[in-house]
Image (cartoon, grey):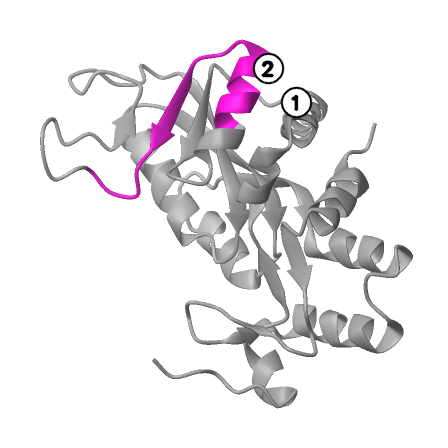
Amino acid sequence: MDYKKQIAKAGLDIKAIKLRPDNPFTWASGFRMPIYNDNRMFLFYPEYRGLLAKGFEQILQLEEIPYDVIAGTSTAGIPPATTLADHLGKPMIYVRDKPKNHGLQNQIEGIDAESDLQGRNIVLVEDLISTGGSSARAVQAIRNANGKCNYCISIFNYGLNKAVQTFGSLNPRCEVRSLLTYDTLLEVAKETGYVNEQQSKMLADWRADPFGWGAKHGFPKVEK
């Protein structure tokens, strides 16, 4: 079963994903963007938590990705990683963006601070990939702890070139596989009537030039 369109429709229905090209959102960077994604909304619905886990499992099977441990990024990657680890009956860890500044100064939670991952195959679960910076740091933290992490799987992926460059700069590179991409989301949004033809064209234009889109359409960057 292909879970991509199911997840896209679910995300739009529960407003985990919002498309608003006529009145774009202001991202933390100050850029005006026509899309906003909050995958935490899936937490409220057990049927959708299960749908995400089954979708991830399908990726692991089809790609024949080896995994001994499921890892989540702190904080938004922890819930889907936990659900997937429970579904697969596998150990689970989570990775902080940086080590704690107190106690044992852990960056990876779930293993003893005086231990490491002992060469195990780790699959990193991320909720959302934009530029890929935080995900790449989590991959490197796992590798620094003697874990093999060559795959990152995410709920959603904007498909930005910056993310491709970021993951490609890792040595060895880390492959990214996502349940839902921006292109599939647009397809479902058009099929369901969530957006009209003009809005669809504006959204496709964003995909071609995300960081120049706002100024081009009369929504300049908000300086902070």
Characterize the local packing of mark 2: few (<14), some (14-19) or many (20 or more) Cα atoms within 10 angstroms. Answer: few
Of badges 2 and 1, the one in the foreground is 2
In the rendered image of this protein, does residue 16 appear above or below residue 198? above
The part of the chain drawn in magenta is 81-99
Residue 87 is marked as 2
Residue 69 is situated, as x and y percent measured from the top left of the image, at: 45, 18
Task: Count residues near mark 1 (Cα–Cα under 10 Å), then give few for <14, some for 14-19, many for 20+.
Answer: some
Residue 57, disc:
1
Element marked by disc 1: helix
Question: To which quarter of the image does residue 206 belong?
Answer: bottom right
Q: Amino acid at mark 2?
A: His
Quarter of the image for residue 25 reads bottom right
Q: Could you say which is closer to the camera, residue 176 or residue 206?
A: 206
For the N terminus, the quadrant is: top right
Q: How many marks?
A: 2
**Residue visible at 68% across and 20% down in the picture:** 61
The answer to whether residue 66 of the structure is visible from this angle is no
Is 102 magenta? The answer is no
Please name whichever residue, 109 or 19, is drawn nearer the observer in this view of the structure: 19
> Tags 2 and 1 in contact by the CB under 8 Å rule?
yes
First in sequence: mark 2 or mark 1?
1
Give x and y (percent) for residue 9.
78, 46
